[in-house]
Amino acid sequence: MAARTAQIRRETNETRISLEINLDGEGKARLETGVPFFEHMLDQIARHGLIDITLTCDGDTEIDDHHTVEDCGIVLGQAVAQAVGDKRGIYRYGHAYVPLDEALSRVVIDLSGRPGLEFHCDFTRALIGRFETELVEEFFRGFVNHANATLHVDNLRGRNAHHQAETMFKAFGRALRMALSADERQADVVPSTKGSL
């Protein structure tokens, strides 16, 4: 399989982002976003997805963290779409359940070529430190709209908002890793009856 890497640069009036990824990495992350809790979550994607991520974002965090988090989701989605190519020889679908103490989340992904998000989490707090919990959904929405993926994220239970968020990001990394994995039985086949995704 050819190297599955991508480099994305994106600049707007709100954020300036540089991203490099390797879908077949070791789970290493180098992150500079100005949003510490968000970096902790991105590190979970890298570690559990075995994706190497180098990301810098200079965003308007003096206003709030919304643009930084959403735009990083957009750029990560673009990079995954670019790196995976025509999706020939991959599983396409992935799923994972991840617990953390009292919290449990399920994530299911389809690299379908069609963007769609079902996000279900009743966070027990509006803030984790300074991080607004509603931004978790904004990150995933940015990702699916630009990766052209269908994503179902369900926090099934949890009392600690940090645990709720962390289980979703870990499960996302694990599900993405499964979907991107090589399917040896269909090594040169696009996993769709349509013949393209």
Image: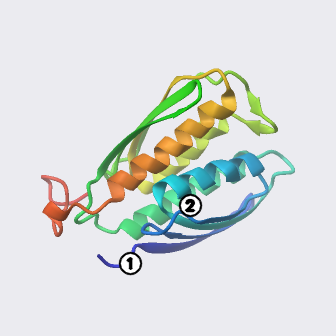
Q: Residue at x 73, y 36 (%)?
A: 132
Residue 126 can be seen in this image: yes
- Toward the front, the furthest residue is 101
Amino acid, disc 1: Ala
The image shows residue 150, relative to residue 153, as above or below, that is below
Image quadrant in which you'd find residue 13: bottom right
Does 92 sit left or right of 166 as displayed? Answer: left
- Real-space CA distance between mark 2 and mark 1, rounded to the nearest whole angstrom: 19 Å
**Residue 113: x, y in percent?**
32, 53
**Residue 1: x, y in percent?**
29, 76
Look at the numbered disc 2 and give the secondary structure of its residue: helix
Camera-side residue: 108 or 114?
A: 108
Camera-side residue: 21 or 118?
A: 21
User: In the rendered image, which quarter contains the C terminus?
Assistant: bottom left
Look at the numbered disc 1 and give the secondary structure of its residue: loop
Camera-side residue: 43 or 126?
A: 43
**Residue 87: x, y in percent?**
28, 63
| Mark 1 surroundings: few (<14), some (14-19) or many (≥20) residues within 10 A | few
Q: Which residue is mark 2?
A: 75
The image shows residue 71, relative to residue 88, as above or below, that is above
Q: Which residue is mark 1?
A: 3
Q: Number of callouts in the render?
A: 2
